[in-house]
C-alpha cells in the first residue's frame, strides 16, 4: 500500500506534463473568455464601481462653484451651505453646530474629508486657514498646499458657507473638480459635495474710445503708501456710456500689448520698471488701485503707490490703466515723475557714536496682538548722525540692523516685523511659538519708534516682565536700549449693568 501512494503523485505529474505537451502549440494564444466569465467580470466591476461611488453619509448636499481662473490670485467664490439641514440631522441648533465647527463650544462636531477617488475618510478637520476646510488636487483628493494643489475650501461660520478658491496658475479653462467636505456628530454623517467649474477669461475685443494723459510728480517712497491721482470721471462715464464706476472692468496693459484682467491691488495692478503689468517683485515700480474706501479718495481719483525704495529721484515710468464697459475702453496713460526728496532736517553735528539708554515699557496684557510705541527718533539721530528720513531709508534698505543682547558679524535673522524679534522669557530672540513679547522698529520719513506687544498664548494673563538689550546699528553708529518690558495683568471685564 505504501508503494501505491508513492506512485500516484508521480503518475499525476506525468499525466499533467503529457497534457501540457500536447497543448504546447497553443500555449501562447489569447484565452477567449466565455459568456459566463464575461458576466462574472462585469458583476465584479459593478460591485467595485458601486463601492467607489457610494458616499458614506446620512445627508448629502450638493453645490456648484464657478471660478474664473487666475494666474496671480487665490480668488474664487462663496458657496452658502444649508447648515439648517445639517443641524436638523445632528439634532442640534444651527448656533451649536457652528460653534462646534469653530471649536468654541456647542455641539460635538468633527470636520473631515472624503477622498473622491476612493470614498475613504480623511480624518483631518482642515489643512487650510479655517477650522473646517481642505486643499484638493485635480482628482478631488485631499492634498497639501503646493504643486499638486488645485482648489481649496474654507468654512466661515459667520457667512454660513465655504470660501472656495484656487491655487494661482494651476486651473485650466473647462476643468472640473469635485470634492467632499464632511461633518460627523452623534454617529451621523453629513457630506457636502462641491463641483468646481474653472472658467477661462474671455478675450478682450473692446475698442479704446478715449485716452486721458496724466502726469504726476511724486517723491521717493520707502513704503506702500498711496497718493490720489485725479482723472476726468465725467469723460469716463460719457465715453463708456455708463452711470457708475460699479459697471467697470479694470484693465492693465502688458508688455505684449494685451490686457491683464486680473486686478491684484484693489481693482488695480503692479507695473514693472518699464511700465507694464507684471507680478509684484524686485522689478516692480508702482501700482494702481480704485475704490478702496479705507483711502477716502474721491471718486475721480485712483490710488498710486510705489514699491518701497524702488523709485529714486529722476526715475520716470509711464503706465497704462484702463476702464472697460459696453465693449469700450477708456485708457489712462499716467507718467510718473520721481522728484528728489527735500529733507526738512539737518544732520546732527559730529561723528557717529555709541549711545546707551534704559527704557521701561508698560502694557496691559491683551489677546489680540495690540502694540504700544516708544519714541526713539532723537536717540537714533544722535547715535547715527543722520536725519530721520535717512535712518528710515536705511531701515527699508536693510542697511540699518537690529541685534538682541549681542552684536554679531552676521546679518540678523529677524523673527517678527522686520526689523524686529519675538523674544522669549529669558530675553533672547525666539520664534513666534516661544515668544512672550515682540519688539520691532517702525516709523516713516518723520518718525521712528520701537513698538511691540505680548503673545496672547504664551504671555501670562497675570502679567510678566521681560528684560533684553536692543542694539541698533547704522552708519558706523550704535544705539543700545536696555529694555524692560512690563506686561501687566489683563484688565478685568466690566460687568453688564
Image (tube, rainbow, N blue to C red):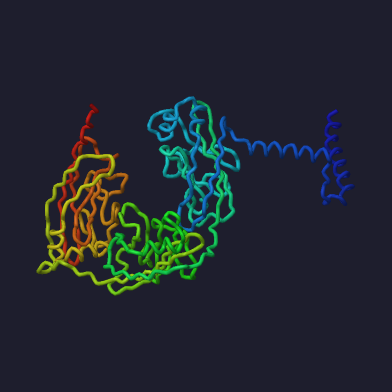
Looking at the rendering, in which quadrant would you find the C terminus? top left
Residue 115 higher or lower than 415, as above or below = above
In this rendering, position of residue 235 left or right of residue 137:
left
At 16% from the left and 46% from the top, the residue drawn is: 361
Residues 276 and 426: in front is 276
x and y, in percent, of residue 312 in the image = 29, 71
Q: Residue furthest bottom?
A: 314
At 45% from the left and 39% from the top, the residue drawn is: 132
Residues 89 and 321: in front is 321
x and y, in percent, of residue 97 in the image = 44, 30
At 26% from the left and 72% from the top, the residue drawn is: 339
In this rendering, position of residue 184 left or right of residue 424:
right
Indicate the quadrant where residue 447 lies. Answer: bottom left
Looking at the rendering, in which quadrant would you find the N terminus? top right
Residue 147 higher or lower than 387, as above or below = above
Residue 36 higher or lower than 188, as above or below = below
Amino acid at each position: 500500500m505504501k508503494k501505491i501512494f508513492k506512485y500516484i503523485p508521480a503518475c499525476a505529474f506525468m499525466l499533467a506534463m503529457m497534457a501540457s505537451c500536447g497543448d504546447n502549440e497553443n500555449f501562447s494564444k489569447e484565452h477567449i473568455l466565455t459568456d459566463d466569465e464575461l458576466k462574472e467580470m462585469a458583476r465584479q466591476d459593478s460591485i467595485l464601481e458601486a463601492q467607489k461611488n457610494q458616499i458614506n453619509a446620512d445627508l448629502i448636499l450638493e453645490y456648484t462653484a464657478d471660478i474664473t481662473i487666475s494666474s496671480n490670485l487665490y480668488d474664487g467664490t462663496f458657496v452658502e451651505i444649508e447648515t439648517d439641514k445639517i443641524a436638523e440631522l445632528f439634532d442640534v441648533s444651527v448656533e451649536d453646530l457652528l460653534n462646534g465647527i469653530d471649536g468654541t463650544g456647542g455641539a460635538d462636531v468633527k470636520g473631515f474629508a472624503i477622498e473622491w477617488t476612493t470614498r475613504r475618510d480623511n480624518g483631518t478637520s482642515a489643512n487650510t486657514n479655517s477650522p473646517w476646510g481642505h486643499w484638493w488636487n485635480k482628482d478631488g483628493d485631499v492634498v497639501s498646499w503646493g504643486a499638486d494643489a488645485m482648489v481649496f475650501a474654507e468654512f466661515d461660520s459667520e457667512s454660513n458657507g465655504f470660501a472656495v478658491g484656487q491655487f494661482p496658475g494651476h486651473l485650466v479653462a473647462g476643468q472640473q473638480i469635485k470634492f467632499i467636505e464632511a461633518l460627523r456628530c452623534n454617529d451621523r454623517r453629513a457630506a457636502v459635495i462641491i463641483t468646481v467649474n474653472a472658467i477661462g477669461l474671455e478675450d478682450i475685443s473692446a475698442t479704446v474710445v478715449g485716452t486721458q494723459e496724466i502726469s504726476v510728480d511724486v517723491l521717493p517712497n520707502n513704503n506702500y503708501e498711496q497718493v490720489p491721482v485725479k482723472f476726468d470721471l465725467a469723460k469716463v462715464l460719457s465715453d463708456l456710456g455708463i452711470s457708475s464706476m460699479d459697471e467697470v472692468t479694470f484693465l492693465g496693459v502688458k508688455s505684449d500689448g494685451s490686457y491683464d484682467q486680473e486686478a491684484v491691488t484693489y481693482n488695480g495692478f503692479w507695473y514693472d520698471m518699464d511700465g507694464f503689468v507684471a507680478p509684484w517683485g524686485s522689478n516692480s515700480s508702482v501700482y494702481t488701485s480704485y475704490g478702496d474706501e479705507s483711502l477716502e479718495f474721491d471718486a475721480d481719483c485712483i490710488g498710486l503707490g510705489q514699491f518701497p525704495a524702488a523709485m529714486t529721484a529722476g526715475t520716470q515710468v509711464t503706465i497704462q490703466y484702463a476702464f472697460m464697459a459696453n465693449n469700450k475702453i477708456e485708457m489712462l496713460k499716467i507718467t510718473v515723475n520721481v522728484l528728489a526728496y527735500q529733507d526738512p532736517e539737518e544732520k546732527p553735528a559730529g561723528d557717529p557714536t555709541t549711545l546707551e539708554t534704559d527704557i521701561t515699557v508698560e502694557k496691559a496684557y491683551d489677546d489680540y496682538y495690540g502694540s504700544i510705541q516708544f519714541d526713539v527718533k532723537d536717540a537714533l539721530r544722535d547715535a547715527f548722525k543722520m536725519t530721520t528720513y535717512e535712518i528710515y531709508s536705511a531701515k527699508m534698505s536693510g542697511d540699518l540692523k537690529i541685534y538682541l543682547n549681542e552684536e554679531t558679524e552676521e546679518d540678523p535673522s529677524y523673527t517678527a516685523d522686520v526689523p524686529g524679534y519675538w523674544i522669549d522669557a529669558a530675553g533672547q530672540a525666539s520664534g513666534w511659538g516661544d515668544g512672550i513679547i515682540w519688539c520691532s522698529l517702525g516709523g516713516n520719513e518723520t518718525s521712528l519708534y520701537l513698538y511691540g506687544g505680548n503673545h496672547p498664548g504664551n504671555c501670562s494673563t497675570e502679567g510678566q516682565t521681560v528684560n533684553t538689550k536692543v542694539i541698533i546699528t547704522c552708519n558706523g553708529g550704535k544705539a543700545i536700549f536696555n529694555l524692560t518690558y512690563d506686561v501687566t495683568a489683563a484688565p478685568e471685564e466690566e460687568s453688564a449693568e
